[in-house]
Image (cartoon, rainbow, N blue to C red):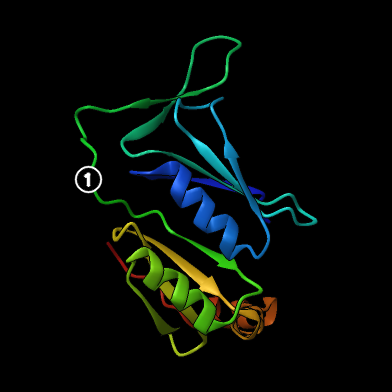
């Protein structure tokens, strides 16, 4: 189970606000402990789910001794590099509502069926960071497809590849 995750964005406040909206009644608030200019989207659900949104180009780094890690800009990477990080989130909103939010923001979004097993709305935050948004129907498909029994069967059918 995940409690929170972090992503980066050019406009952390705006992105956190939209994610809070997708949570269906969440809230976005400043979140400066890790990196200056950060925001967090609070789902306000039973798990206190959050998405931390750092300024684009922030990298998390360990700190020596008894101190928290910090988020610092990485000038070597710039502000428009791609990442492999993405996440899937549940929403109480309908597919039409999610797509309307994406259109309002100018963010690409489309329905996709992952592996023929479950649907997602593939939304691209600020045009280059993917989040998969799952409506109630899509959540049911996801949970059924990834049940422990189905995952065990899938794992047993996959042949290890030699490197």
Residue 20's quadrant in the figure? bottom right
Q: Where is residue 118 in the image (x, y as percent from the top left)?
A: 53, 85
147 up-or-down from 25: above or below: below
The answer to whether 136 appears left or right of 89 in the picture is: right
Can you say which quadrant of the picture contains the C terminus?
Answer: bottom left
Using the image as rendered, state which of residue 98 and residue 54 is in the foreground: 98
Q: Give me the residue at 23% from left, 46% from top.
A: 81
Q: Which residue is situated farthest in the front direction here?
A: 104
Q: How crowded is mark 1: few (under 14 residues within 10 Å), some or many (20 or more)?
A: few
* In this rendering, position of residue 10 left or right of residue 121: left
The picture places residue 104, in percent across and down from the top left corner, at 39, 68
Residue 161 in percent (x, y) is at: 33, 70
Q: Residue at x 46, y 27 (%)?
A: 35
| Residue at the disc numbered 1 | 80
Q: Out of 145 and 3, give the one closest to the viewer.
A: 3
Asked whether 111 or 98 is in front, the reply is 98
- Number of numbered discs present? 1
The quadrant in which the N terminus is found is bottom right
* Residue 91 placement: quadrant: bottom right
125 up-or-down from 135: above or below: above
Taking 20 as reference, is 53 left or right?
Answer: left
Give the residue drawn at x 31%, y 51%. Answer: 83
Q: In the image, what residue occupies the spot 45% across and 25% down?
A: 36
Q: Is residue 73 above or below residue 47?
A: above
């Amino acid at each position: 189970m995940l409690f929170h995750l972090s992503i980066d964005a050019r406009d952390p406040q705006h992105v956190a606000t939209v994610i809070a909206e997708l949570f269906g009644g969440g809230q976005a608030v400043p979140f400066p402990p890790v990196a200056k200019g950060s925001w967090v989207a609070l789902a306000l659900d039973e798990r206190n789910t959050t998405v931390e949104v750092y300024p684009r180009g922030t990298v998390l780094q360990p700190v020596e001794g008894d101190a928290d890690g910090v988020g610092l800009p990485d000038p070597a990477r710039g502000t428009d590099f791609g990442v492999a990080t993405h996440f899937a989130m549940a929403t109480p909103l309908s597919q039409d509502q999610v797509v309307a939010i994406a259109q309002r923001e100018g963010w690409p979004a489309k329905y996709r069926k992952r592996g023929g097993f479950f649907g997602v709305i593939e939304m691209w935050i600020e045009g280059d960071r993917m989040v998969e948004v799952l409506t109630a129907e899509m959540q049911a498909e996801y949970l059924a497809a990834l049940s422990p029994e189905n995952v065990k069967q899938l794992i047993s059918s996959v042949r290890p590849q030699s490197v």
